[in-house]
Image (cartoon, grey):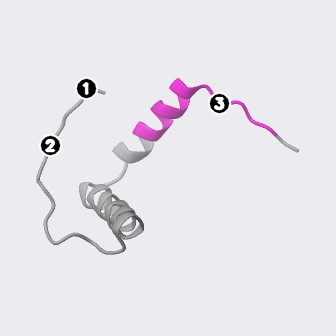
């Protein structure tokens, strides 16, 4: 069995770098896909209305 230990800080930086290299439409598309999958899993269907919210964090 092969095991690779990864420092969480390195993994976070790698994730951020990956998504910053994607276009805005690709990022929004992925968030939309994940949201749809989550609500279908949770409720069995996508809700009619989703509250708008925006949060920002410094990277």
- Tell me: 9 left or right of 29: right
Residue at point 36%, 73% (across, down): 44
Image spot of residue 53 (x, y percent): 13, 46
Image spot of residue 13 (x, y percent): 46, 31
Q: CA distance from mark 3 to mark 2?
A: 31 Å
Q: Which mark is residue 29?
A: none
Disc nearer the start of the sequence (1/3): 3
| Residue at numbered disc 2 | 54
Please provide the residue range marked out in magenta: 3-16
Q: CA distance from mark 1 to mark 2?
A: 14 Å
Residue 47 sits above or below residue 22 on the image? below
Disc nearer the start of the sequence (3/2): 3
- In the image, 40 versus 17, the foreground residue is 40
Residue at point 31%, 75% (across, down): 45
Q: Are marks 1 and 2 in contact (CB under 8 Å)?
A: no
Question: Would you say residue 33 sits in the magenta stretch?
Answer: no
Residue at point 31%, 57% (across, down): 31
Q: Secondary structure at mark 1?
A: loop
- Tell me: 12 left or right of 51: right
Q: Residue furthest front?
A: 43
Residue 5 sits above or below residue 15 on the image? above
Image spot of residue 1 (x, y percent): 88, 44
Q: Secondary structure at mark 2?
A: loop
Q: Residue furthest bottom?
A: 45
| Residue at numbered disc 1 | 58
Q: Which mark is residue 6?
A: 3
* Main secondary structure type of the part rendered in magenta: helix
Q: Nearer the viewer, mark 3 or mark 2?
A: 2
Residue at point 55%, 27% (across, down): 8
Number of other residues with Cα within 10 Å of mark 2, as a class: few under 14, some 14 to 19, many 20 or more: few
- In the image, 49 versus 15, the foreground residue is 49
Residue 36 sits above or below residue 14 on the image? below
């Amino acid at each position: 069995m092969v095991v690779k230990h990864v420092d969480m800080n390195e993994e976070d930086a790698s994730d951020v770098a990956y998504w910053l290299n994607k276009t805005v439409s690709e990022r929004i598309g992925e968030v939309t896909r994940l949201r749809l999958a989550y609500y279908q899993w949770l409720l069995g269907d996508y809700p009619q209305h989703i509250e708008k919210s925006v949060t920002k964090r410094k990277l």
